[in-house]
Image (tube, rainbow, N blue to C red):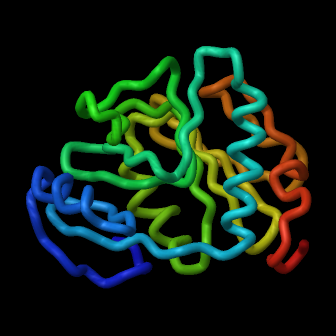
Amino acid sequence: MPVVAPRTLTMSPEDYFEWEASQTERHEFHFGEVFPMSGGTSAHAEIIIALGSLLYAELRGTEYKVRSEAMRVQISGDEYVYPDLSVTRGPGTFRSTRKITLLDPVLIVEVLSPSTRSYDYGEKLALYRSVEDVLLVDSQRRHVEVVRRTDDGWTLSGALEGVASLRSVGVDLEVEDLYRDVTGFEDA
C-alpha cells in the first residue's frame, strides 16, 4: 500500500463512493481500505501541468481525451486510484452516469515523489493490468520511464534525455519539454 498515509478506514466500495463525495481531500481505495492522498511539491505540480499541456496539445482534435488527477480510475474490481493524468481512446467509459470514475484509460501518468516512488513502481504499477502504457516521471531529477504492456507482461524503457515514446496514443514527448521551466528539483 502507499506509504503516504496510514490505513485509516475500512468500508465497501459503495460506502467509499458515498463517503468520498463528502470529503474535501481525495482518497484511494484498495480492497476495502481507504488511504488519504498526500499533497505534492512545487516540482510535482509543475510537471503535471507541463505533461497535461503537452499531451493536450498533441492529442487535441484526435480520438484521445486527457484527464487530470481529479479523475478517479477503477483499475480492478475493488481498486480505485487517482493517477496524475490519464488518457482514454474515445470519450471514455465510466462506472456510472455521474462520470466520476473512469474505467478504460490506455495511458496512465504517474509523477513520482519520494513518498510514493516504491508504491507507484511496485504495487500500483502491477494493478494497471488493462493500461497499454504507464509513463513514470521523476519529480526530483530529469528521468522518465515508459512501462508498456506486452503479451509477455511489461517492458520498461528509460529516458534521461531524448524522447519518451507513448505508443498507446501515438505521441513522442521530448523529455526536455517535460522539465522545461520546472523549479525545485536537484538538476533544475
Q: Position of residue 50 (x, y in %)?
A: 77, 51
Up the image or down, 142 lies above or below 89; here it is: below
* Residue in front for this viewpoint, 130 or 7: 7
**Viewer-closest of 43 and 175:** 43
Q: Quadrant of residue 60?
A: top right
- Asked whether, in this view, residue 2 is left or right of residue 60, the answer is left
Q: Is residue 32 left or right of residue 138?
A: left
What residue sits 79% from the left and 71% below the top?
141
Name the quadrant of the N terminus.
bottom left
Q: State whether residue 116 is above or below residue 168.
A: below
Is residue 179 depicted above or below 147 in this figure? below
Q: Position of residue 87 (x, y in %)?
A: 55, 34
Q: Residue at x 77, y 39 (%)?
A: 54
The residue nearer to you, when weighing 113 against 161, is 113
**In the visual, does 142 lie left or right of 13?**
right
**Image position of 131 (left or right of 21):** right
Rendered residue at 55%/46% (across/down): 68
The C terminus - image quarter? bottom right
Residue 163: x, y in percent? 84, 41
Q: Where residue 142 sits: x, y (%)?
A: 82, 64
